[in-house]
Amino acid sequence: MELPLVSVVILNWNGLPYVITCLKSVLASDYPRFSVIVIDNGSTDGSDKAIEMQFPNVLLYRMENNLGYAAGNNIGIVESLNKGCDYILLLNNDTEVPPNMIYSVVSDMLQNPQAGVVGVKIYLLEEPDRFWAVGGVFRSNRLHTLGINEHDHGQYNNVKLDFVFGCGILIKSEVFEKIGLLDTRFFFYYEDIDLCLRAKKAGFDVLLASEATLKHKKRLESQRASKFKAYQYERSRILFYCKYLVGRAKLWFVLAQIPHQIVSALRYIYHEKRLSMWLEGICGMFDGFSRCIRLC
């Protein structure tokens, strides 16, 4: 039987030299049927030119501006679907994959016919014996992320999850054909979780790969370490919960934002981070609420 055709989509925004290392690791894969698409989201650090020079066989799309994670990846997803790819592998540009990763995650997909989304075990590059994270569940109107900074003792092998993370995620083309593309209302953050929940609602399983792994360059909790990211995280968080909560649960969520932001401010002070980042998060929160109101 011929192996499925896989399209690897990598989104890049000012990722030099990370994206170069990522591409070298992907192109060293032992899987025989895959192609690579890089969507450059308006980089200004020369990474797009470096990709073009060093990897002439990689299909490179240059965007004039930063479109965000969802809109940027959608360009690569549409191209992959048009090429007739069976599976699409989304990768962050700051990841490194072992040679057998694509083969391993494809094997998990083939062995689980009901699966539509398979995430890989994500380890910290700086501490390769620890998870970055593995995914999570949506229970009691809350997201619960699993595996953060844990050692791998096989506790998550073949577990069915509600969501996995988009820095390393294999998706059947059939999923996009059935539920549509990534929701571009999320500039970045939460769009991968949203995709997984939509896939589950459509009848697909979301799994964590049994052996496929990759290494990620930063801790999960460090992702909001800039004003821009703090803004986008809070904005997407509000949009996500407004999308998935209804009735009384949504009302309680809105009311809970006052104590939530007080705790967030205290956490910023405790960790000696700039309160200006917290204020950016507040702005992102109000932006999220304003968009939710307009959508109602």
Image (cartoon, helix red, strand yellow):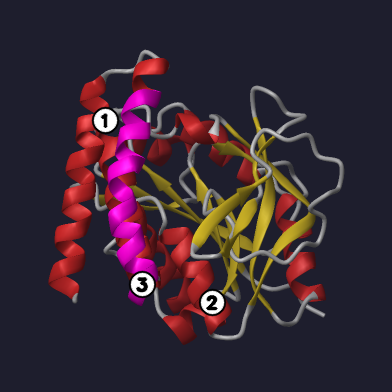
SS assignment for the magenta stretch, majority: helix
Residue 150 seen anywhere in this rendered image of the structure:
yes
Please provide percent x and percent y for residue 208: 71, 59
Three-letter code, disc 1: Trp
* Magenta highlight on residue 154: no
Q: Is 231 on the left or on the right of 172, as rendered?
A: left
Mark 2 residue crowding within 10 angstroms, few (<14) / some (14–19) / many (20+) = many
Please provide percent x and percent y for residue 89: 57, 60
Q: Secondary structure at mark 1?
A: helix
Q: Residue at x 48, y 86 (%)?
A: 178
Q: Residue at x 67, y 64 (%)?
A: 161
Comparing 7 with 204, the one in front is 204
Q: Which residue is mark 1?
A: 278
Mark 2–mark 1 Cα distance, whole angstroms, equals 33 Å
Q: Is 198 on the left or on the right of 241, as rendered?
A: right
Question: Is residue 265 shown above or below 93?
Answer: above
Residue found at the very far right of the displayed protein: 153
Mark 2, mark 1: which one is toward the viewer? 1
Highlighted range, magenta: 246-267
